[in-house]
Amino acid sequence: MEKYVLGFDIGTTGTRAMIFDRKSQEMASAYSEFPQYFPQDGWVEHDAQEIYDITLKMAAEALKKGNIKPEQIASIGIANQRETTVIWDKKTGIPACRAIVWQDRRTLPICERLKALDGENFVRRTGMILVPNDAATKIAWLMENREEIRHGLEEGDLIYGTIDTWMVWKLTEGKVHITEPSNNSVTLLQNAETLDYDAEILKVLNIPRHILPEIRKSSEIYGYTEPAQFFGASVPIGGILGDQQAAAIGQGCLKPGTAKNTYGTGSFIVMNTGDRYIAPSDGIFSPVIYTKDDLVSYGLEGMADVSGAVIQWLRDGIGMIQSAEEAEKLALQAESNMGVYFVPAFVGLGAPYYDSYARGTIIGLSRGADKRHVARAALESMAFQVRDSFEMLERKSGMKLTRLRADGGGAKSDFMLQFQADILGVPVERPEITETTCLGGVYMAGLAAGYWDSIDQVAEFWRVEKSFEPTITDTQRQDQIAMWKKAIERAGGWLK
């Protein structure tokens, strides 16, 4: 009986299930969005049970499309939105409240408190910068603001996990409560060097150790699905990665100095630094990319909270377009951006600024500007944000990045990737499989189950679909960068 590996990419706006064979060929896939909840300005929430139900629904759809039986799955891999915080009853499996999504900004006062207390020390210890994304601050907020949750956590009736932890716990019907270092390294809970929970940060935020999942490797057999949860089959769960580290693995960025950017809801550029841990600074943080056996691979990462979501806003927020493809068509109709710059700081600015008080800004409008120029500026904003982090990664690592590998939904845009190459001054490569986030989790799961032999073997599966070369002069590049920085200044600190 032929075997396959099933991967879940549980993102911020939807879930994708994909099935791959031994040659890393996609056999089937299924995708569905899930609801977003915005109860207050700056708050973003998910229903964890909805995420679980939709993920299983997509698994069933992918199996049906590929005519594959559940027992033909050799291993399951999970790549997930990071830092999103789930609290649930360990007896009933019912969430105690909606999950607080990584984009949520309600914990900004806690971050400011930590910065004032001993910010540099906390950043150095954990490898993570002090931003509201951090799951540790979300747990602290819930304990400070929800009496019933604080009581449940202190008494041990409620437990915590990120989306990976939640999914494994549900699939195993509560038998396995775990996470792994790539996810945990961006929560502010984990010590960057010991890869265990950091006792100092737990003490400062009054987070009980007993609510936290066990930290395992990124690639190992954690447990098996309960047949009642997975279509009658007991299947090993063998790989977990935070979505951005998963994309780096799926892109074959396994050597120091290689880098990828994922254009999803947000934008995430990850650079491999090998076994060298470089402490965070200047808005760049230092995640673990993966662990396997005795190997630990570190990286540097720059993040923008809003990337592809800017196109979603053009569609859903103001109804300017009906689809992402329409934004591309409009942008191609404009010979230039006509001086229009779009800073999509809907929830603040990401790396290297990390200004949670910034807000979205469209600037440079004239009577001749129209929706073509706004669409073009929106797509260009995705590339400008990557360029800001790209420059800082080179400076911190001391390595010269000679190319960038691109993936995620936004990487389907030829216009945007060409502009990305132009504004970086280096080639940008798009792989045959742009959903490399799912692929990274699949590789970890397959390696754990012996489906593939080594990490070097899976690295050879990466294949380029199209390469974009720079086409503008350095003077043109610097002129546009200067205007972008002026637009950033105008958007900064708006809420202060």
Image: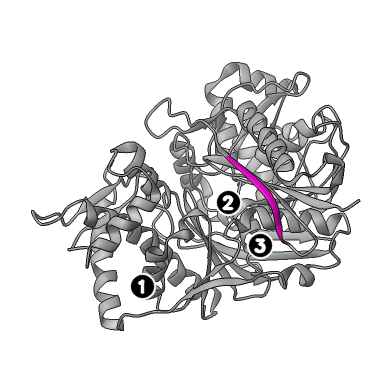
- Of badges 1 and 2, nearer the viewer stands 1
The residue that disc 2 covers is 122
Give the class, few, some or many, for how many residues have Cα within 10 Å of label 1's Cα (few <14, many ≥20).
Answer: many
State which tag comes first along the sequence, 1 or 3.
Answer: 3
Q: Quadrant of residue 432?
A: bottom right
Instruction: Confirm or deny contact between disc 2 and disc 3 (CB under 8 A).
Output: no
Question: In terms of secondary structure, what is the magenta stretch mainly?
Answer: strand
Give the class, few, some or many, for how many residues have Cα within 10 Å of label 2's Cα (few <14, many ≥20).
Answer: many
Task: Magenta stretch: give its range.
Answer: 25-31
Residue at image coords 71%, 69%: 461
Residue at image coords 81%, 52%: 4
Q: Percent x, y for residue 390?
A: 46, 69
SS at mark 3 in the image: helix
Disc 2 versus disc 3: distance between alpha carbons? 31 Å
Q: Using the image as rendered, state which of residue 416 and residue 47 is in the foreground.
A: 416
Instruction: Confirm or deny contact between disc 1 and disc 2 (CB under 8 A).
Output: no
